[in-house]
Every structure is written in structure tokens, then in C-alpha cells.
Amino acid sequence: MSILIKNIKQLVQVHENSVTIVKGKDMKTLPILENAYLYIQDDTIVEFGTMDFCKGIDAETIIDATGKIVLPSWCDSHTHIVYAGNRVSEFVDRINGMSYAEIANRGGGILNSAKQLQDTSEEDLYEQSIQRLDEMIAMGTGAVEIKTGYGLTVDAELKMLKVIKRIKQDSLAKIAPTLLAAHAIPSEYKNDKASYISKIINELIPKASALRIAKYIDVFCEEGYFSIEDTAKILEAGKKHHLIPKIHVNQFNILGGVKLGVDYNALSVDHLEELNKDDINALKSSKTMPVALPACSYFLGIPYTPARAIIDAGLPLAIATDYNPGSTPSGNMNFVVSTACIKLKMTPEEAINAATINGAYAMGFSNMYGSITRGKKANIIITKPMDSYAQIPYEFGHNPIDTVIINGQIL
Ligand SMILES: N=CN[C@@H](CCC(=O)O)C(=O)O
Ligand SMILES: [Zn+2]
């Protein structure tokens, strides 16, 4: 199966050589080709260039992209899309004045989602979750990290991992599975957090590892959830089983989780709504990707991650949705890219770099995803007609997508 996309107004994020990360000042550069073509064979990007060099190239399917922008599909490196039901009543409670923390303290929040998930069959959970993923794909996302963390028992966490595995097998999107059993302290362990941690370390991690259904290990390192010491123990156990750390840090409080993540060679440290100089310095000497989640800040009304301070310090930055029922019930990366520009003061070039190549890096596969490079996977967005790629974040709330191609298949 071959596809030729021709007369492309702007072919965006074009790299002759495989890039895997873009940092600091370089994030302001987004390489483009004007009046270009892109040739795809099966699931792979095979060739691209300006239209002058397109003569003689034929394909089974030809798409005329006159007036349209073509870019790599979004790489969403932080989601919790496997969940049951919703938390719309908590949304209304927050509008009426309750805080996220107050709702969690009365047994709502993550514990509410855990109760709903425990009462939901694996089949039903799969159906609800794949529907969310299909909607994300239609909005231009082609690679997604998915966390557990709404199970909070060994069985329910494994049920979540099995659902993620099925999604991975059935979907054309690239999926990265993460074990986040340390997402909240289950009510039955309210006064005995150590026993829950020991269950994660001695039972759940070894089981998940034996089944080979998780690649990453995550912890919600936050006051009232898991301390620095708890986080270190869980990451240590994960590493023994070859799970790579990707952690939730600095959402509400700075506990030192960024430095801890760096010490454990975390692939990413995510949230960072609160960030200080020590955190930035710790990241400077690391391979860890900071990840901002602007739609979470938008929905909860909490501070936005200081993207300028991160990028201006020469660091890379990725952006992701954080799609989950409590803090971000949205999987729309177009909105995330817009919000990154509007609220985090990132330029469109920085935001698109953060949502493509750096997002792929934060999932560990930027060698195969996140740019238009020969040999990389053909995960492509074709936009509606527009003047330039900057119109994607500019027209916030609009749907810029005309066509998506995932793994070389036109959807
Ligand atoms: N902060 C921790 N976890 C999720 C929210 C979970 C929830 O409220 O259900 C997040 O990343 O925002
Ligand atoms: Zn999250």
C-alpha cells in the first residue's frame, strides 16, 4: 500500500536525520518544506521533498493537500484514559466552591474513580477506554502513554494493564503502558500506607513484570499521597523489574521529586506546576524530559507550568493532555498546543516541538515517531486549509484536522 500526499502547503517538522529530542533555543525552530510532497509505503515514511522533485512518483492512493498543512501526529505522553464512568458531579461541586483537595479528602477524587473501576467488567472498561482513544486519534493523536492507577488493588490494577494490552493490540496508535498503582492510598490502607506500598512492591510489580504488560513505573509524589521516601522505594522496586520511571511531581507542592526522578534516571517528570531553581538545575544535568500538562491547569484553575523558565534554561519540554476523569476530562492535543501558546507563552514552533518529537521522547520512542523523517512510522495529520501551522494554536477550540493517517492507514 502506498500513499502520495502532494501539493502540501507546509510539510512541518521535517528532519533529514533522525532527531530524538529538541531543547532550549532549538525549540524555536520548526523545520518546514513549502509546496512539498510526502510518500508513504505501508507503515513507513519513505520519501519527501518539494513538488519540483515529485515528478514520476506514483502511488496507489494520491491525496491532494493543496492549501493544507501536513505534520507528524501528536504524541501524547501522559494519559489516564482507562477509567470507568466519569466524575461530573465533582466538577459541579468544584464550581460550587469545593477544592480538588477537599473532594479527595471526603473519599472522592481518585478513590471515587477506583470504586467505579473495581465495579466495572474488563470488557466494559475496554469498550469505554478504546472509545476515548478513537476520539483522540480523530483529533490527530497517533501515540499515547496510558497509565493504570484507578484500580488500587492488585486485581484491579492488573485488569487495567490487561485492558491497556488489548488496546495496544487492537489500535493502530502506538501505546506505552505505565503502572501507576501508587496513585492514591486506598481507603482500606488509610492508616497503613506501608502495607499498600509493600503490596505494590512485593506483589504487583513482580506480577506485572512477569506478564510483560507494563513498560513504565509511575508514582504520584505529592503531599497526602506518596512521599519522597515512598516514591524512592517504589521506583527502586520498579527498576529491579526493568520498569522505567515516569513520575507525577510538583503538581501542588515541591517535595524534591524532580531531583529524585533525575537520580532514578526517570524518562520524564510530569506536571511541574510548582517549580523552583533547584528543580531546573537538577534537570540540567539529566536526560529526563520535563512534561507540562496545560489542560490540567486550565480545568483545575491551578498555576501553569513555567515553560519559559524551563526552555530558557536550555532544557527540553514536552506537553501532553493528562486525559483523566478528575483533573482533565479531555484528550484534545490541539487544545493543549493552543493552551501552551496562550498560557505558557510558548511559540507555535515550541509548542509543536513539545507535542511531537519531545512527546515521543517522553514515551521512549522518538527514534520512530514525532517527526517527518525517512524510515519513521507514517503517523500523519493533514489539516484543513490554513495559512500556516501557527493557525493550529491560534484558532483555539476549533478542529484543525482534515485527515489522519496512522501506521500508514488513512482513517
Ligand atoms: N495528579 C494525579 N493524577 C491525575 C489526576 C487524577 C484524578 O483526579 O483522577 C493527574 O495527573 O492530574
Ligand atoms: Zn496524570
Image: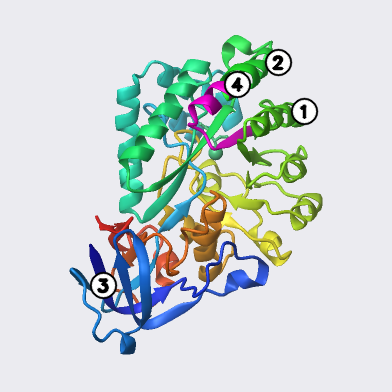
Residue furthest to the bottom in view is: 52
Residue assigned mark 3: 4
Q: Amino acid at mark 4?
A: Asn
Magenta segment: 206-219
Name the quadrant of the N terminus.
bottom left
Residue 229: give its label. 1
* Secondary element type, mark 4: helix
Among numbered discs 4 and 2, the one appearing first in the sequence? 4
Among numbered discs 1 and 3, the one appearing first in the sequence? 3
* Secondary element type, mark 2: helix
Q: Is residue 269 above or below residue 387?
A: above
Q: Which of label 1 and label 3 is nearer to you?
A: 3
- Residue 218 in the image, given as x and y percentages of width and height: 60, 35
Residue 121 falls left or right of residue 357: left
Residue assigned mark 4: 105
Residue 410 falls left or right of residue 30: left
Q: CA distance from mark 4 to mark 1?
A: 22 Å
* Secondary element type, mark 3: strand
Among numbered discs 1 and 2, the one appearing first in the sequence? 2
